[in-house]
């Protein structure tokens, strides 16, 4: 079996591969780029594995005129840049010691040892520079069935890094087959080991949750996380009842993790997941608007059409009510509205705090009139 995608034949990729093979070393594409190529999914990062130490990778890359950056040399990783495109090349590794958060690794001698330290069988697929797939652990049948399965014993893999619990749900959401359900061995191991999630950094947990919630339909995975108790470890006090209705109401809209996080209802998300300030603010805003009383037209006027749309869908999901057939019309009306009066129109009759209150009242009257009052009508209202 071979993969055959444009990135495999790109001059930058060929230059990196040729630089390594010129030194008569083994070089393989590995992980996501191979998995996604076989599934026909988009490939964003190019990761490679080799049987030589990182210093040799640097020598060969520089001899070929390529830039070699020691981005993770202590872990055996060198980023080789060709035509501005990064290629992460990591020496075969094996775990020497793990504590559930991080691993002490040593360089390995074979591709099988390298494969065994990975998490899922579908991530332990390799490909030679000509595209020939190498499957040292028999992961191809799992990939073809879209079955997310831990390598070896599920509990052993999880205890090496408890983040793999969340990675399991994330991979099942993105690559699993919903109708086939979840792997019973994986769920049993997760139920047994989930307390380990509490020792992980909130940044790592947050990053995984954002990736999971960015999938087309994360609701089934999140529901199972709740049933097992995982969600309570990750987001204590959250409630996923509105998530499935929200996903349904979103239809063909692009997935937005912020709206899904808002649906879960946890208030201090920034602390719980170490979200960026901007993302946390967006989640809080959507949640506040959804549980507020502002109509869609006013939301679109005060914020923007996208925010109004997401907030109204979230409101419908939280209240278990259908979306108004007039939603798009209302949002378009508000998004196009421009207040026809400004503070300058009220000076010198009003000033200071009174000026601000008067302008705010006129704006409220204008919104209540569905944005139809003219400047003249608003000024006339002050004289009556």
Image (cartoon, rainbow, N blue to C red):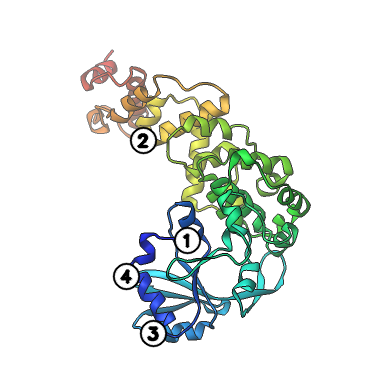
Residue at screen point 66% across, 71% down: 103
Is the Cβ of the residue at disc 4 closer than 8 Å to that at disc 1? no
Q: Earlier in the sequence, mark 4 or mark 1?
A: 4
Outermost residue toward the right in this view: 192
Q: Earlier in the sequence, mark 3 or mark 4?
A: 4
Other residues around mark 1 within 10 Å, as few (<14) / some (14–19) / many (≥20): many
In percent of width and height, residue 171 lies at 58, 51
What secondary structure is found at the residue carrying circle 4?
A: helix
In percent of width and height, residue 293 lies at 49, 24
Q: CA distance from mark 2 to mark 4?
A: 43 Å
Residue at screen point 40% across, 60% down: 4
**Is residue 25 something one can see in this rendering?**
yes
Residue bearing the label numbered 3: 62
Q: Earlier in the sequence, mark 3 or mark 2?
A: 3
Residue 202, picture quadrant? bottom right
What secondary structure is found at the residue carrying circle 1?
A: helix
Residue bearing the label numbered 1: 33
Q: Earlier in the sequence, mark 1 or mark 3?
A: 1
- Depth check, mark 1 against mark 3: the one in front is 1
Residue bearing the label numbered 4: 11
Residue bearing the label numbered 2: 304
**Is residue 274 something one can see in this rendering?**
no
| Quarter of the image that includes the C terminus | top left
Other residues around mark 2 within 10 Å, as few (<14) / some (14–19) / many (≥20): some
Is the Cβ of the residue at disc 3 closer than 8 Å to that at disc 2? no
């Amino acid at each position: 079996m071979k993969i055959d995608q444009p990135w495999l034949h790109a001059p930058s990729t060929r230059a990196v591969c040729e630089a390594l093979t010129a030194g008569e070393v083994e070089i393989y594409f590995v992980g996501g780029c191979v998995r996604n190529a076989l599934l026909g999914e988009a490939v964003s990062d190019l990761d490679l594995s080799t049987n030589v130490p990182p210093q040799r990778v640097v020598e060969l890359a520089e001899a070929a005129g390529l830039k070699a950056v020691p981005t993770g040399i202590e872990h055996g990783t060198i980023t080789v840049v060709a035509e501005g495109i990064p290629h992460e090349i990591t020496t075969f590794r094996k775990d020497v010691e793990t504590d559930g958060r991080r691993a002490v690794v040593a360089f390995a001698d074979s591709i099988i040892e390298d494969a065994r330290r990975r998490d899922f069988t579908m991530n332990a697929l390799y490909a030679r520079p000509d595209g020939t797939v190498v499957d040292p652990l028999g992961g191809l049948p799992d990939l073809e069935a879209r079955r997310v399965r831990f390598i070896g014993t599920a509990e052993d893999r999880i205890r090496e890094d408890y983040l793999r619990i969340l990675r399991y749900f994330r991979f099942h959401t993105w690559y699993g087959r919903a109708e086939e359900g979840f792997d019973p061995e994986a769920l049993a191991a997760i139920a047994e080991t989930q307390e380990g999630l509490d020792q992980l950094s909130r940044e790592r947990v947050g990053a995984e949750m954002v990736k999971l919630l960015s999938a087309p339909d994360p609701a089934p995975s999140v529901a199972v996380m709740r049933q097992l108790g995982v969600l309570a470890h990750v987001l204590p006090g959250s409630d996923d009842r509105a998530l499935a209705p929200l996903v349904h109401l979103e239809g063909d809209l692009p997935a937005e993790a912020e709206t899904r996080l808002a649906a879960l209802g946890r208030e201090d998300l920034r602390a719980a997941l170490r979200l960026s300030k901007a993302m946390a603010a967006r989640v809080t805003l959507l949640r506040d608007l959804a549980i507020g009383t502002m109509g869609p037209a006013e939301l679109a006027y005060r914020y923007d059409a996208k925010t109004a749309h997401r907030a109204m869908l979230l409101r419908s999901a939280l209240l278990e009510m259908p979306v108004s057939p007039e939603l798009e019309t209302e949002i378009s009306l508000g998004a196009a509205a421009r207040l026809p009066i400004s503070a300058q129109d009220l000076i010198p009759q009003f000033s200071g705090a009174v000026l601000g209150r008067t302008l705010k009242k006129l704006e409220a009257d204008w919104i209540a009139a569905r944005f139809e009052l003219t400047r003249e009508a608003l000024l006339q209202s002050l004289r009556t």
